[in-house]
């Protein structure tokens, strides 16, 4: 068992980490860290547990620590669910102290030495860990993408054998993506907000890095163009997106590619049986009905039609955040980087 901790354990994504790690077969959750408001108090007293699954009582008494390596001495790996502006320095400090960091925050994603990984899409990019180590670091940082980007690249992965260069995407994103206090009820109820700060830029750049090729010590971006329009909708969990790709193959050929798809990795505890599920029903995927497919780790695709057009949807705080990071950590562990 590998001892792990969570940075930002009280937040929307932090709670998902706690849920996924409290009974993990490879990882032993020993340390929970949050802001000064929470540090020094028992986790059960400071967390406002908002998940549908029961609160894991066995960690209720665990004392929340400060977000410093010295306060988290027994851990080999930390999961970061910190706000990006805090994560920037904190994650560097942990990696410099010899600790592996699996981060959900956007701060380091686009740095050339930092792997931006979705295990089913670009597992080989973990090779950038060696580049960080060669530069003299004892630990390392591995990131997972933005929650909408994960759904997009997962849905594109089975289509890589076809030629395409132009992707257009319009998202309908859940309010949990903005964190617990992110969107006021008065703003989102009976409404759609056609702006999510920096989200479009993230989808347009992160996709190219993830679907790029690791050549020597760097990733060469995928040679295509992504154009995104992002919108907040009154859904609690589950990011949905309409996607247009310039694939010329017949619809049936594309559907077969989804049906036959086998991801390049297997044997990880958090990996779902299907990383991408092709919905047969004409009115699916829908967030309320499909977000928990594969324990929240499966991306559902449907409405594949001429154009080529389709709809993709996945759980933003599980597949799009904490689950993605845990899957990265499992791959890191399997590949003996720890
Ligand atoms: N929500 C989502 O779907 C997704 C979120 N992300 C990213 O994950 C990260 C966390 O998001 P989310 O969980 O929604 O955020 P929340 O606001 O819900 O939680 C933030 C967490 O960080 C802690 N924190 C805040 N300020 C500080 C500080 N100054 N020092 C130490 N700890 C601090 C909080 O502790 P305390 O309770 O003590 O204040 C809390 O545990 C962000 O970078 C976000 O962009 C990524 C993908 C999806
Ligand atoms: N911006 C996303 C969530 C998020 O925090 O993304 P990122 O990890 O790229 O900061 C949303 O609002 O749904």
Image (cartoon, rainbow, N blue to C red):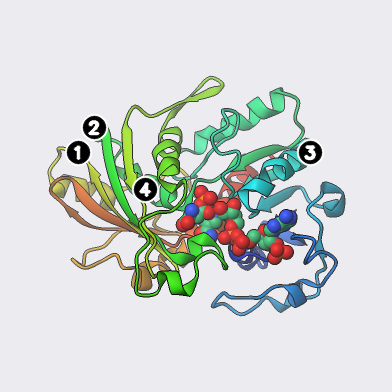
Residue in view at x 54 percent, y 78 percent:
52
The residue that mark 3 highlights is 98
Mark 2 or 3, nearer chain start: 3
Q: Position of residue 273 (x, y in %)?
A: 42, 59
The residue that mark 4 highlights is 152
Q: Residues within 10 Å of mark 2 (few under 14, many from 20)?
A: few
Q: Is residue 317 visible?
A: no
Q: Position of residue 269 (x, y in %)?
A: 56, 57
In the image, the residue with mark 2 has its CB under 8 Å from the nearest atom of ligand 2: no
| CA distance separating discs 2 and 3 | 42 Å
Above or below, comparing residue 278 to residue 156 in the picture = below
In the image, the residue with mark 3 has its CB under 8 Å from the nearest atom of ligand 1: no
Marker disc for residue 163: 2
Q: Quadrant of the N terminus?
A: bottom right
Q: Secondary structure at mark 1?
A: loop
Residue contact between numbered discs 2 and 1, judged by CB atoms under 8 Å? yes
In the rendered structure, the answer to whether residue 190 lies left or right of residue 66 reads left
Residue contact between numbered discs 1 and 4, judged by CB atoms under 8 Å? no
Q: Residues within 10 Å of mark 1 (few under 14, many from 20)?
A: some
In the rendered structure, the answer to whether residue 263 lies left or right of residue 224 reads right
Q: Secondary structure at mark 3?
A: loop
Mark 3 or 4, nearer chain start: 3
Residue in view at x 57 percent, y 77 percent:
53
Q: Position of residue 284 (x, y in %)?
A: 26, 66
Above or below, comparing residue 2 to residue 52 in the picture = above
Q: Position of residue 333 (x, y in %)?
A: 65, 45
Residue in view at x 70 percent, y 73 percent:
47
| CA distance separating discs 2 and 1 | 6 Å
The residue that mark 1 highlights is 247
Mark 1 or 4, nearer chain start: 4
């Amino acid at each position: 068992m590998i001892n792990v901790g969570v940075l930002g354990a009280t937040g929307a994504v932090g709670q998902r980490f706690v849920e996924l790690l409290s009974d993990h077969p490879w990882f032993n959750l020993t340390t929970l860290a949050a802001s000064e408001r929470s540090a020094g108090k028992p986790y059960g007293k400071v967390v406002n547990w908002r998940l549908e699954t029961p609160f894991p009582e066995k960690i209720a008494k665990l004392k929340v620590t400060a977000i410093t390596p010295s306060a988290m001495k027994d851990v080999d790996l930390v999961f970061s669910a910190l706000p990006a502006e805090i994560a920037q320095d904190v994650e560097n400090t942990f990696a410099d102290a010899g600790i592996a960091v699996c981060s959900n925050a956007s701060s380091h994603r686009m740095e050339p030495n930092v792997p931006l990984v979705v295990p089913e899409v670009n597992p080989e990019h973990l090779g950038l860990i060696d580049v960080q180590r060669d530069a003299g670091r004892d630990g390392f940082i591995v990131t997972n993408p933005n929650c909408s980007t994960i759904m997009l690249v997962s849905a594109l992965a089975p289509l890589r054998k076809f030629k395409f260069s132009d992707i257009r995407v319009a998202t309908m994103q859940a309010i949990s993506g903005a964190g617990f206090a992110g969107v006021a009820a008065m703003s989102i109820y009976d409404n759609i907000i056609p702006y999510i700060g920096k989200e479009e830029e993230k989808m347009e750049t992160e996709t190219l890095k993830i679907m790029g090729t690791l050549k020597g010590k760097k990733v060469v971006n995928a040679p295509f163009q992504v154009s995104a329009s992002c919108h907040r909708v009154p859904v609690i969990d589950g990011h949905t997106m309409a996607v247009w790709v310039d694939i010329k193959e017949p619809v049936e050929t594309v559907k077969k590619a989804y049906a036959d798809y086998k991801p390049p990795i297997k044997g990880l505890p958090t990996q779902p049986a299907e990383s991408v599920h092709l919905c047969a029903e004409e009115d699916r995927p829908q967030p309320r009905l499909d977000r928990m497919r594969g324990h929240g780790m499966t991306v559902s695709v449907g409405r594949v039609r001429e154009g080529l057009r389709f709809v993709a949807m996945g759980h933003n705080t599980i597949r799009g955040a904490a689950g993605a990071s845990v899957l990265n950590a499992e791959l890191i562990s399997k590949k003996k980087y720890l």
